[in-house]
Each structure stands twice: as C-alpha cells, then as structure tokens.
Image: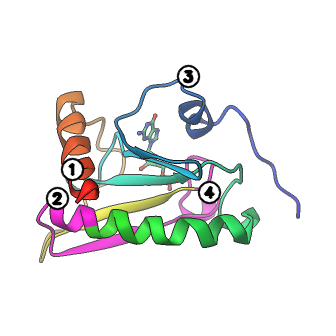
Amino acid sequence: MTTNYDNDNIFARILRGEIPCHKVHEDEDAIVFMDVMPQSEGHALVVPKAHSRNLLDADPGVLAKIAPMLQKVAVAAKQAFNADGISLMQFNEGAGGQTVFHLHFHIVPRYEGVALRADGRGMEDNEVLAANAEKLKAALAG
Ligand code: 5GP
C-alpha cells in the first residue's frame, strides 16, 4: 500500500514527547489527549501509535485494536462533560477535511440544539484543557 507519512507531523512529534499535550491516557497502542482547538468542551483525540497517514493506509489490525478504545473514551467523555451525545469524527486527506496527517479520531461531546464551534476558532486556555483532561481521565478510571 502506498503511503506518504511525514515523520515530523505534529502528532508524531507529540508521540515522541517533543511537543507537550494534555494527556488523558496512554498505552502500548494509543495515546489520548485534548484537542487544543476544541469544537466543543471536552473535545479529545484518540491517536494510534502506529504510523499511518489516515484510515486509508492504516493496518486493519491497528483499527481492530483502536475500536474498543474509541468506545471507552466516548462513554467516558459523555459522562465527564454531561453530554447528550458524542460525535466520533475522522477525516482523510485534505479534501476530506484532514489537517494533521497521522491517523486520529475526534471524540466530541454534543448537546441538544448546540452546533459545533467553528474550526480555527483559536487555542483553548491551557488551564481549561488541563482541567478537562483531568475530568476525562477520572471518568475513564471509572
Ligand atoms: P483533522 O482535521 O486533521 O482531523 O484535525 C486535526 C486536529 O488536531 C484539529 O482539531 C486541531 O485542533 C488539532 N491540533 C492541531 N495541532 C495540535 C496540537 O499541536 N496539539 C493538539 N493537542 N491538537 C492539535
């Protein structure tokens, strides 16, 4: 399968610890951290450690391992942020809305009648991201 994976994309650098993140969870397969430009309170990213640009070049075995994690984080986020629902989003290539070219899944808490915040609204305050990471961590710990 052809892929064009850039080792210096921002999530690869976060995975190597070169750039900080508000980490919620890490295991041998994935890391979960808060999105710095949340489209809703508590917007988190689930990022498999294996290198692929996106879903299109991902190893199916990696996808099989990540699915239970997506469910766990979605359930925890719904509880942690008192959400009415969760949007699970994943974008592929620029035309598909992807901006960071390392496979990742968005877990976005949703509320009845509330639209998503516009993309590019800017960075959330560090204290807010840190507090939300702690809330999600606590809900994941159950
Ligand atoms: P995509 O459109 O590629 O699915 O979304 C990439 C996401 O990564 C965006 O929601 C954006 O806010 C988030 N993002 C971009 N750079 C960083 C960063 O340095 N740290 C974190 N935590 N999130 C980032």
**Residue underneath mark 4:** 94
Residue 136 pos. (x, y %): 24, 51
Give the spatial CA distance, label 3 vs label 4. 25 Å
Residue span colored magenta: 76-103
Q: Earlier in the sequence, mark 3 or mark 1?
A: 3
**How far apart are the two marked residues, 3 and 1, measured between alpha carbons?**
26 Å
The residue where tag 1 is placed is: 138
State ligand 1's quadrant.
top left
Task: Classify the position of the N terminus by image quarter.
Answer: bottom right
On the question of residue 89 being in view, the answer is no
Q: What element carries label 4?
A: helix
User: Disc 2, disc 1: CB below 8 Å?
Assistant: yes
Question: Residue drawn at (53%, 33%), measured in percent from left and top?
Answer: 14
Mark 2 or mark 4: whose residue is earlier in sequence: 2
Disc 2 versus disc 4: distance between alpha carbons? 31 Å
Q: Tell whether circle 3 marks a residue whose Cβ is less than 8 angstroms from ligand 1.
A: no
- Marks 3/2: CA distance? 28 Å
Work out whether residue 125 or residue 68 is closer to the camera in this orientation and state it.
Answer: 68
Assess whether mark 1 and mark 4 are in contact (beta carbons under 8 angstroms). Answer: no
Q: Residue furthest front?
A: 142
Q: On the image, numbered disc 3 is attached to which residue? A: 18
Q: Considering the numbered disc 3 on the image, is that residue within a helix, a strand or a loop?
A: loop
Badge 1 amino acid = Ala
